[in-house]
Amino acid sequence: MVLLPHVGGTVAELAVAKAEVAKRQKAQDGLKVEALKLGAESKKLSEESVLLLKRYTRYALSVTLFQVAIGLAAIATLVRRRPLWLVSLLVGAVGSAALISGFLA
């Protein structure tokens, strides 16, 4: 008996096809659950990455300001200019503030 004359399938072939469909649907459902778990984990890690990048940026800014302050202090010492030395202290203080804001971020 041909069940599907236009395809040429029999009842046994139809049963095998249905079993294959059920197997693939079960696998797809499992993958869907896993994809949802991975999506949630990905979102969590992405948010953590943004926070860490923000901290890194503040730390990098503080290091740069410290280096500028050290350079200005060295130049102020060489040319014996007290106002330039005071500016280097100010830049160092701003670098310290950037460092503290990195810890608080």
Image (cartoon, grey):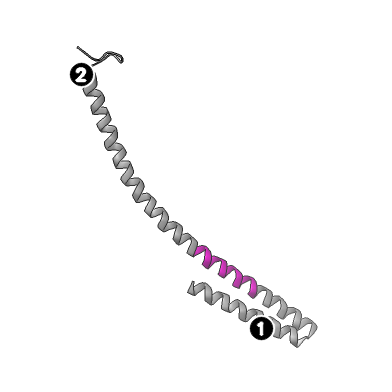
Q: Find disc 1 in the rendering and name its residue.
A: 89
Q: Residue at x 33, y 43 (%)?
A: 32
- Magenta portion: prevailing SS class: helix
Q: Quadrant of residue 47 in the image?
A: bottom left
Residue closest to the eye, 70 or 27? 27
Q: Residue furthest bottom?
A: 82
Q: Is residue 55 above or below residue 32?
A: below
Where residue 5 appears, as percent x and y from the top left, is: 27, 13
Q: Residue at x 26, y 37 (%)?
A: 26
Where residue 86 appears, as percent x and y from the top left, is: 70, 85
Q: Residue furthest top?
A: 1
- Name which residue type carries label 2: Ala
Residue closest to the eye, 49 or 85? 49
**Badge 2: residue crowd in 10 Å (few <14, some 14–19, many ≥20):** few
In the displayed structure image, the side of residue 17 where residue 65 appears, left or right: right
Highlighted range, magenta: 52-66
Q: Is residue 69 above or below residue 31?
A: below
Where residue 4 appears, as percent x and y from the top left, is: 26, 16
In the picture, the quarter occupied by the N terminus is top left
Give the label on residue 12, or none. Answer: 2
